[in-house]
Image: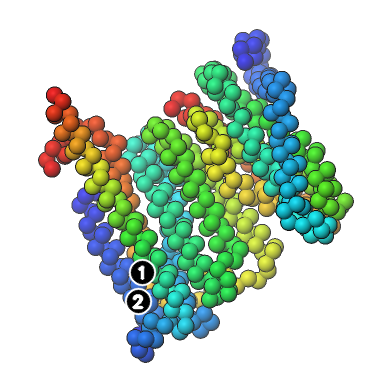
Amino acid sequence: MSEMLTNEPVQSSEQTMRGLFLAVLKRDLLLSYRRRSDLVNPLIFFLMVATLFPLGVSPEPDFLAQLAPGVVWVAALLSTLLSMDSVFRSDFEDGTLEQTLLSPQPLFVVVLGKVIAHWMLTGLPLALLAPVLGIMLFLPDGGMGGLMISLLLGTPTLSLVGAIGAALTVGLRKGGVLISLLVLPLYIPVLIFGTSAVQAAVTGLPLGGYLALLGAMLALGIVMAPLAIGAALRISVSG
Amino acid sequence: MSFDSFSDFLAMGGHGLYVWLSYAIALFVIVINLVSPVLRKKQLVSELVRRLRREKNAS
Amino acid sequence: MGKLLPWFAIVTAALLVSGIVWALAFAPSDYQQGNSFRIIYIHVPSAILAQSCYMLMAIAGAIGLIWKMKVADMVAKSSAPIGATMALLALVTGAIWGKPTWGSWWVWDARLTSMLILLFLYLGVIALNSAIESEATAAQATAVLALVGLVNIPIIKYSVEWWNTLHQPATFTLTERPAMPAEMWVPLLVMVIGFYCFFAVSLMLRTRNEILHRERRARWVRELIEKQ
């Protein structure tokens, strides 16, 4: 992270903010590109969970089609959660996180950059992969668009809220299960409106209202969650 | 009094099991919530007493 | 606190005993649900208490976080288990009430579902608090989580209610009824106040323990122990 903190020429504050955001984003994307297994694991998990449902319940197309919106959404939610633990973990272990907290740069922007990077590596590929799952679960073609848009709007909120849990547990050795415990109840509204959007799309009802609600939650999350994440990181690192 | 006899009162119009069960559970929860802090205090005090005695013996 | 406690204990006992006797023996039975309706006198107070307890926990946590008041941290920590047991009590009595009313132990009714989620939030707070070893850090982290939960509770409640109306229109809710007669709601009020007083007593007892535990190296604790 040192290059990003020192090589920054003096600019207007707006430009430095954007520069900081982009630098954090680039760094996190580059780091995870170098460790590709972490990148692919949530996606494989996503596919596997969806495979379990026909095996565990019934391969009947009509039945699966009814189940599909919920299954895809729950699988996306769980695989986001699975990758959540690693957002701050390596930075915490090698001391980068402490340096970031001590640096004069606004924590809000740094945290937002990290979360967006996490979303680009999990939520975005999940949304792009979702139609494959939709086909496997016999989701009607009309629902595909709704599924992808609702996932695109909903998964950033999942990343933002999940990062609060990750920040709170980053100082603990066994944070993995605890994160799910803290964060899953908070995921419920996103799950409800996400699956409802898909169901509306399947039945041909207008889904603008659901997407608006998902967008509202995302807007609220972008404004509020980085504050909570920042506070939680300060507590975890100093304690 | 909205019941004619004591057996009526126990039966609760056929729903006796449900009514009495929920009141029993409620009482249990309330009592647990009051007794457990009291027990915890006893435990804390005895721990502190023991530590004090140890420190006195050591010095 | 030491002087107030016995008074609160007496008031709690008086209110709860009179409330329970009134609720069980003297309140009229409901014309639709018969005597199973008497469970309302446990269910509603515990549900109300579970919700206000979360509010208190989050506010106390915020005070501890902002003004670094140790007592506020302790109050927040002490209120979590009481709130969790109250949420559990509301759920169990709701299930028991559901059996004669709906014919099944559990229905995905909006209120019961949001109470279940509230219980999950409590369990998360308790789990986080017990996972962090340093008491000061645990208190701060819990406060952040409780505040995040507080912001989320209205959103969760709204979304669950909306989801419920979508999936099961016109369910028969447990507690919503037009204009309850005075013979019915007066004992309910007595029970609600009684539950609040019980909460105050339990909270005081727990907070005193917490103070004793955290200040175990302080001189006044040593002097207190030496007297015994």
Q: CA distance from mark 2 to mark 1?
A: 9 Å
Host chain of mark 1: C
- Give how far across and how far down residue A230 sits, in percent: 54, 30
- Give how far across and how far down residue C5 sits, in percent: 24, 54
The reply to whether dot 2 and dot 1 touch (C-beta < 8 Å) is yes
Label located before the other in sequence (2 or 1): 2
Residue C148 is left or right of residue B34, and the answer is right
Instruction: Locate residue A90: give its quadrant.
Output: top right
**Residue type, mark 1 in image:** Val
Determine the residue positioned at 45% across, 50% down.
C55
User: Looking at the rendering, in which quadrant would you find the C terminus of chain C?
Assistant: top left
The residue positioned farthest toward the front in the image shown: A55
Give the number of callouts: 2
Q: Which label number is shown at residue C179?
A: none
Closer to the camera: disc 2 or disc 1? 2
Determine the residue positioned at 53% across, 46% down.
C149
- Give how far across and how far down residue C21 sits, in percent: 33, 75
Q: Which label number is shown at residue C190?
A: 1
Determine the residue positioned at 29% across, 63% down.
C12
Host chain of mark 2: C
Residue nearest the observer in this picture, C198 or A121: A121
- Give how far across and how far down residue C63 sits, in percent: 40, 39
**Residue type, mark 2 in image:** Trp
Q: Is residue A205 visible?
A: no
- SS of the residue under disc 2: helix
* Residue indicated by mark 2: C22
Judge if badges 2 and 1 mark residues of a common chain. yes
Instruction: Locate residue A57: give its quadrant.
Output: bottom right
- SS of the residue under disc 1: helix
The residue positioned farthest toward the left in the image shown: C227
